[in-house]
Amino acid sequence: MLDADSSTGVTGRRAQDWEAELQNFLDHLAPGTRADEIDLSRRWTLVHAWTHRWSSEPSEPVWMEVDAGPGISGIEGPAPGHWWSAGAFEEATRRAANRLLGAGLVAGDRVIWSVSSSVAALVVHVAALRAGLVVVPVNTSSTERELAHVVRDVLPAAAIVDRKDRAAWIAGAIGAPGLVIGPELDLPDADGPPIDTVDPDDPALICFTSGTTGLPKGAVLRHRHLLAGVESLRLAWRWTEGDRLVHALPVFHAHGLCVGIYGTLTAGASALLLPGFDEQAVADAASDCGASLFFGVPTMYHRLVASGLAGSLGRLRLCVSGSSPLSVALFDACHAAFGGSVLERYGMTETLMNTSNPYDGERRAGSVGFPLPEVELRFSTDGEILVRGPNVFDGYWHRPHANEEAFEPAADGGDPWFHTGDLGVDDDGMLVIRGRSKELILSGGFNVYPAEVEDVIGRHPGVAEVAVTGTPSDEWGEVVTAWIVPDGKAPTPEDLAEFCGPLLARYKHPRRVRTVEVLPRNALGKVVRNRLG
Ligand code: MLC
Ligand code: AMP
């Protein structure tokens, strides 16, 4: 599993010692699961796994919207508060897939998908996958400028949005003959080319993330990566048809989409869809409606505990946290509030989920568990976590240079290792994340890249120099903090918010602004961010 010639560098032990010590997920699967029957790399696709399930259990419930969000009109189906059956969802996605192909889109075309959580948004998403299109999820709070970068990069043939104002400026960015769909799906019914013909190697998603360095780039996730990613979770978390997820995460990121939505569909389970996160709505959904699962980022657990509403999570079979570190204090506070141990797992857009605490057995506070089935993990000499497995993507969209840096050929001739940019150690058989070698701020589970924010703030006339870091916060994990050498009168946080408004999504704006006389620099003149508070 581990490269024999690499060393951990963290403790001075040889790499193969780690293999012996990190626990093996095969020891933690449900009783009766036969290890030799697990094959996550099998030649199948998300679409085939789902259509197979829908045809065998058409009357089973799949989704219920707890409350209506912005949504996409023109898709017929049950109203909020009523369940969509597998059969109804199959029919709606089939019809929408035919409408997309009938409008002239062809398999392999990229389609931007920037929507809040709603069943209609999922119908169009799954329809696009069934039509062989490549979906490019984009955060709904992105500015026009941020979206233009994605458009230039993937040259989409269409965009699907659920807000009128965004539709107008997305139309401008895509240009003719691009198709902008939404907030109404106003395409005629059609009988176009056949659907459900995708291959496991076909790209399903291009997800924008900055990886370890540089401007946002598109991680290409193929059908086989996504299916392997959810199959390992289905096994590890014992996700079954009887489960019901309280889904309050945004659907445009890996956590909400590739874990929450794809996991629900692949397990043949159901989910209560909330249009966004709200403590009371989560508590109500968890106490009612037969819910059994909740997945959240630490900020959500923090808010549930702080509001006194976390108690209702105690009714659920499993609560999972991920996307940023769950502090030991918050793990303990959750335990005190609802009696359960939150299960923490570790993943990335590029790799989907890599490690998890076990379903049975010790869930250790501060640890992200051990490699999921078929995931291999090792440490570089400076402690960086490297992974490979059927879940790990194989490259960024049109970025040969970034791909060379991100992957390391394997000594055993197998798949190359992906550099995660996260630093980890083996703590008595479990992985503990000790920081990051990449420059990334994790605010409420959203990623913010210092260089991107510095580039914008540096253009403010009152700023001579700027460095951006994440500073600790109980609620957000880290908050974006700007360290400014002023040019004349220093701008206030309000000035900066106004200045950043059209340029950066709101969650990237600095919440803290500190004025300094000089920025710490190394011998080469480069700013050393980690010497700033
Ligand atoms: C919202 N705001 C944020 C923010 N989220 N600011 C900083 N960091 C964030 N994460 C802004 C809002 O725009 C608003 O601005 C103000 O903060 C307060 O908003 P709020 O209403 O209090 O926050 P809310 O909208 O409730 O959002 C909080 C949240 C959300 C925790 C629900 O951030 C969230 O859904 N986070 C999940 C992110 C996620 O899914 N990450 C997974 C990535 S995949 P204003 O100006 O209006 O006041 C990945 C892989 C893996 O990482 O391992 O899973
Ligand atoms: P993203 O690029 O949005 O997919 O974010 C992935 C990054 O989130 C990882 O590389 C980690 O730095 C971080 N991350 C995800 N889960 C955890 C976790 N449980 N603990 C610490 N960091 C995490």
Image (cartoon, rainbow, N blue to C red):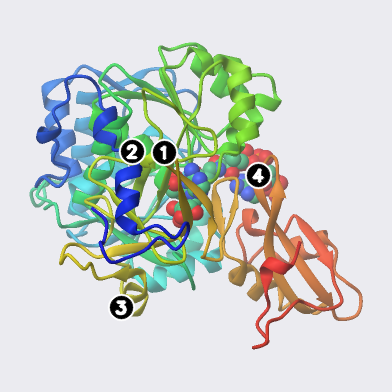
Furthest residue in direction bottom, as rendered: 524
- Camera-near label (1 vs 3) is 1
Instruction: Report if the CB atoms under discs 2 and 1 are less than 8 Å apart.
Output: yes
Q: CA distance from mark 4 to mark 2?
A: 31 Å
Q: Provide the secondary structure element on which disc 2 rests.
A: loop
User: In this rendering, does residue 183 appear at all?
Assistant: no
Crowding around mark 3 (Cα neighbors within 10 Å: few <14, some 14 to 19, many 20+) is few
Q: Position of residue 245 (x, y in %)?
A: 40, 25
The type of residue carrying mark 2 is Gln
- Camera-near label (1 vs 4) is 1
The response on whether ligand 1 sits within 8 Å of label 4 is yes
Residue 372 lies left or right of residue 279; in this view the side is left
The answer to whether residue 208 is above or below residue 251 is below
Q: Quadrant of residue 173?
A: bottom left
Q: Quadrant of residue 235?
A: top left
In this rendered view, identify the residue nearer to me: 335 or 58.
Answer: 335
Residue 221 lies left or right of residue 452; in this view the side is left
Crowding around mark 1 (Cα neighbors within 10 Å: few <14, some 14 to 19, many 20+) is many
Q: Position of residue 462 (x, y in %)?
A: 83, 77
The type of residue carrying mark 4 is Trp
Instruction: Report if the CB atoms under discs 1 and 3 are less than 8 Å apart.
Output: no
Q: CA distance from mark 1 to mark 3?
A: 33 Å
Residue tagged by mark 4? 476
The response on whether ligand 2 sits within 8 Å of label 2 is no
The type of residue carrying mark 1 is Gly
Residue tagged by mark 1? 369
Residue tagged by mark 2? 23
Q: CA distance from mark 2 to mark 3?
A: 35 Å
Residue tagged by mark 3? 400
Q: Quadrant of residue 14?
A: bottom left
